[in-house]
């Protein structure tokens, strides 16, 4: 890791004409392969921040890392208990909710920036830019947004760690973010922000590709390319499994 980081740092030392600090990010894996035995993985996001002359920053700074997955449309339903039975009641659709959203910072977000800055850069679960469809009252929107975040937090898809970034000698930083097995495939972005005195002084983006491989890729491709045949095969497999189970129990 140190050799790769040194190469990245040296490549940026030529940018001496700018006045703002230079943020040099890197990620331990640029590609995550989802196979049958995939149980999740851990991404290491690391890098350095230097002044335009290639020296360490003159003032202490904070680092916030935001790892975001592909967006997807979602329908959130609210359950209510009626006559002793839980049933679906009101619902709200979101056009572009992140499939995965993890924030890791060197200090709690509230100690680093104000709410306005946090909202601009989506620094935290409370500041995600969710897009509900149709007309909806602000109170109702807040209720459904909170419900969506809590649901995905329980699934391990939304998370926030206010002490997840460590900074060494005011130059090097690193953060570890766990990626669970239930993530969807697609392109993930890891955006790193260097913040000083409540102001974002530098930012940079790294990308991570999550893709299915092996048998999972074959099944996914066939379900998209030949949906009708895939459906027939699934039904036949279910019938065959049920028949085999019935015969097995009949012999016991």
Image: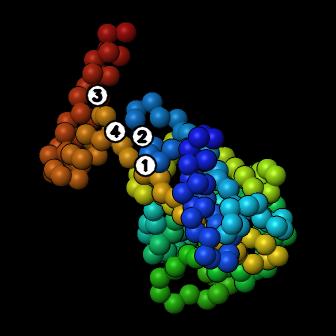
Distance in Å between CA atoms under marks 2 and 1: 7 Å
Question: Position of 37 compared to 59: left or right?
Answer: left
Q: Which residue is mark 1?
A: 210
Q: Which residue is mark 4?
A: 213
Task: Check contact, mark 4 vs mark 1: CB within 8 A.
Answer: no
Distance in Å between CA atoms under marks 2 and 3: 26 Å
Distance in Å between CA atoms under marks 4 and 3: 25 Å
Is label 2 or label 3 in front?
A: 2
Q: Position of residue 145 (x, y in %)?
A: 62, 73
Question: Position of 70 compared to 177: left or right?
Answer: left
Question: Position of 182 compared to 226: left or right?
Answer: right
Q: Position of residue 233 (x, y in %)?
A: 19, 39
Distance in Å between CA atoms under marks 2 and 4: 6 Å
**Mark 1 crowd level (few <14, some 14–19, many ≥20, 10 Å Cα):** some
Is label 1 or label 3 in front?
A: 1
Task: Check contact, mark 2 vs mark 4: CB within 8 A.
Answer: yes
Q: Is residue 17 shown above or below 98? A: below
Q: Secondary structure at mark 4?
A: loop
């Amino acid at each position: 890791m140190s050799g790769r980081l040194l190469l990245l740092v040296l490549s940026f030392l030529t940018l001496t004409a700018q006045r703002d600090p230079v943020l040099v990010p890197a990620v331990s894996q640029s590609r995550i392969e989802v196979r049958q035995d995939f149980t999740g993985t851990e991404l290491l996001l690391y890098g350095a921040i230097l002044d335009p002359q290639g020296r360490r920053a003159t003032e202490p700074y904070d680092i916030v890392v935001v790892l975001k997955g592909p967006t997807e449309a979602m329908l959130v339903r609210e359950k209510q208990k009626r006559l002793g039975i839980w049933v679906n009641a009101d619902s709200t659709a979101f056009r572009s909710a992140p499939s995965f959203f993890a924030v890791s910072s060197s200090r709690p977000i509230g100690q680093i920036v104000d709410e306005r800055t946090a909202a601009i850069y989506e620094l935290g679960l409370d500041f995600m830019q969710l897009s509900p469809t149709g007309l909806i009252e602000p109170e109702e929107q807040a209720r459904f947004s909170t419900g969506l975040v809590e649901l995905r937090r329980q699934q391990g898809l939304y998370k926030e760690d206010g002490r997840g970034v460590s900074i060494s000698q005011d130059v090097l930083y690193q953060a570890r973010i766990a990626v669970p097995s239930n993530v969807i495939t697609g392109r993930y972005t890891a955006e790193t922000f260097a913040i000083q005195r409540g102001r974002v002084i530098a930012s940079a983006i790294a990308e991570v590709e999550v893709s299915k491989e092996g048998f999972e890729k074959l099944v996914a491709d066939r379900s998209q390319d030949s949906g009708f045949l895939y459906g027939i095969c699934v039904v036949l497999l279910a019938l065959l499994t049920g028949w085999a189970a019935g015969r097995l129990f009949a012999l016991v």
